[in-house]
Amino acid sequence: MKLVNKKNVISIICITYTVVSIVLGTLEIIVKREINPSQLNMFLCLFLSILGVGVLSQHYRLEKFSPLTMVIIQYLVAVAIILISLKIASYFTNIHPDGYRDMTISFSIPYFIGAVIYYICLRLEVRKQNQILEKIKNNRNKS
């Protein structure tokens, strides 16, 4: 049995890289007892990635809304979490006056690209599942 194949090699590389980067970054912070801007940026990107994926993965809770409304609600929830997190962080460190705007923009562009890809893939998967159900239904009717 082959664990790594053509279908999952990119995913495995990405997961491995992420885990190694996080572990090495965390160990370096522990050993040096300080965090440098590159490490902070790396963990911020991790946080934003988790947030984006987490918010998109909750689409099924909003299925009663139109797709556009769903996307807007998800985006507003994500941005609210970011802005609240920045506000909390501002009690521990100085936030640049443009930090709130910059963080929102830095999140929004990749989020919308990811959301478009996510919803296209979701639509394709639903279409595929509907075709399978239709085949099963047709096979039962023939029997």
Image (cartoon, rainbow, N blue to C red):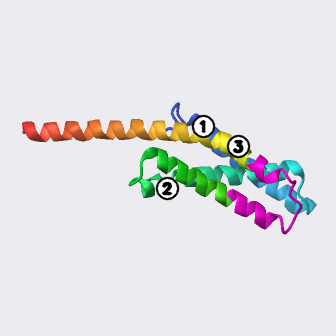
Give the number of the mark in front: 1 or 3: 1
- The amino acid on which the numbered mark 2 sits, given as a three-letter code, is Gln
Give the number of the mark in front: 2 or 3: 2
- In the image, residue 143 sits, relative to residue 44, either above or below, namely above
Q: Residue 13 carries which label?
A: none
- The amino acid on which the numbered mark 3 sits, given as a three-letter code, is Tyr
Whether residue 61 is visible to the viewer of this picture, yes or no, is: yes
In percent of the image, x 86 and y 54: which residue is there? 97
Front-most of residues 47 and 83: 83
Which residue is labeled 2 in the image?
A: 58
Q: Is residue 36 left or right of residue 79?
A: right
In percent of the image, x 61 and y 50: which residue is there? 52
- The amino acid on which the numbered mark 1 sits, given as a three-letter code, is Ile
Instruction: Measuring from the top left, give residue 80's x and y in whole percent.
Output: 65, 59
Which residue is labeled 1 in the image?
A: 113
In percent of the image, x 64 and y 45: which residue is there? 15
Q: In this view, does 97 lie to the left or right of 48?
A: right
- In the image, residue 36 sits, relative to residue 10, either above or below, namely below
**Per the image, is 85 magenta?**
yes
**Residue 96: which quarter of the image?**
bottom right
Name the residue furthest top: 6
Badge 2 density bin: few <14, some 14–19, many ≥20, Cα 10 Å:
few
Instruction: Measuring from the top left, give residue 88's x and y in whole percent.
Output: 77, 67
**Per the image, is 122 magenta?**
no
Secondary structure of residue under mark 2: loop
Front-most of residues 75 and 129: 75
Front-most of residues 118 and 33: 118
Image: magenta residue range: 82-103
Which residue is labeled 3 in the image?
A: 17
Among numbered discs 1 and 3, the one appearing first in the sequence = 3
